[in-house]
């Protein structure tokens, strides 16, 4: 379910993780494209009722992080 967004020299990986209460946590991981995954910065993007809503929330948060260089 992971998706990758790229902007210039940065990469954002987004995912939605199901929680024990059946909600979904939207997660964003950003890094420089030349760095390994271990260098990713985690950005929480909220809790949502569905996987689709969580992925949409994660994408919106990732685009903001990429646009504003939040790393």
Image (spheres, rainbow, N blue to C red):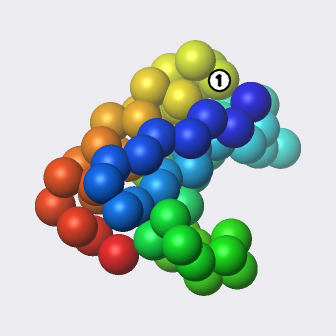
Q: Nearer the viewer, residue 60 or 13?
A: 13
Q: Residue furthest left?
A: 68
Residue 44 visible within the image = no
Instruction: Name the residue at 69% across, 38% down.
Output: 2
Instruction: Name the residue at 67% across, 76% down.
Output: 36
| 49 in relation to 27, above or below | above
Picture quadrant of residue 55: top right
Q: Nearer the viewer, residue 18 or 37?
A: 37
Q: Nearer the viewer, residue 57 or 21?
A: 57
| 11 in relation to 51, above or below | below
Quadrant of the rendering where the C terminus is positioned: bottom left
Q: Residue furthest bottom?
A: 39
| 57 in relation to 65, above or below | above
Please provide percent x and percent y for residue 14. 57, 44
Q: In the visual, does 10 lie left or right of 31?
A: left
Q: How many marks?
A: 1
Residue 55 visible within the image = yes
Badge 1, how many Cα within 10 Å: few under 14, some, many 20+? many
Picture quadrant of residue 32: bottom left
Quadrant of the rendering where the N terminus is positioned: top right
Q: Nearer the viewer, residue 3 or 24?
A: 3
Please provide percent x and percent y for residue 21. 77, 38
As helix, strand or loop, the secondary structure at mark 1 comes to: helix
Instruction: Name the residue at 65% across, 23% down.
Output: 51
Residue matched to label 1: 51
Please provide percent x and percent y for residue 66. 28, 55
Q: In the visual, does 39 lie left or right of 66?
A: right
Please provide percent x and percent y for residue 34. 54, 72
Instruction: Name the residue at 50% across, 21% down.
Output: 53
Q: In the visual, does 27 lie left or right of 9?
A: right
């Amino acid at each position: 379910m992971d998706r990758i967004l790229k902007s210039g020299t940065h990469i954002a990986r987004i995912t939605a993780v199901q929680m024990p209460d059946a909600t979904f946590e939207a997660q964003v991981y950003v890094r420089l494209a030349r760095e390994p995954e271990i260098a990713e910065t985690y950005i929480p993007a909220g809790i949502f009722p569905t996987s689709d809503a969580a992925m949409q929330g994660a994408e919106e948060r990732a685009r903001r992080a990429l646009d504003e260089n939040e790393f």
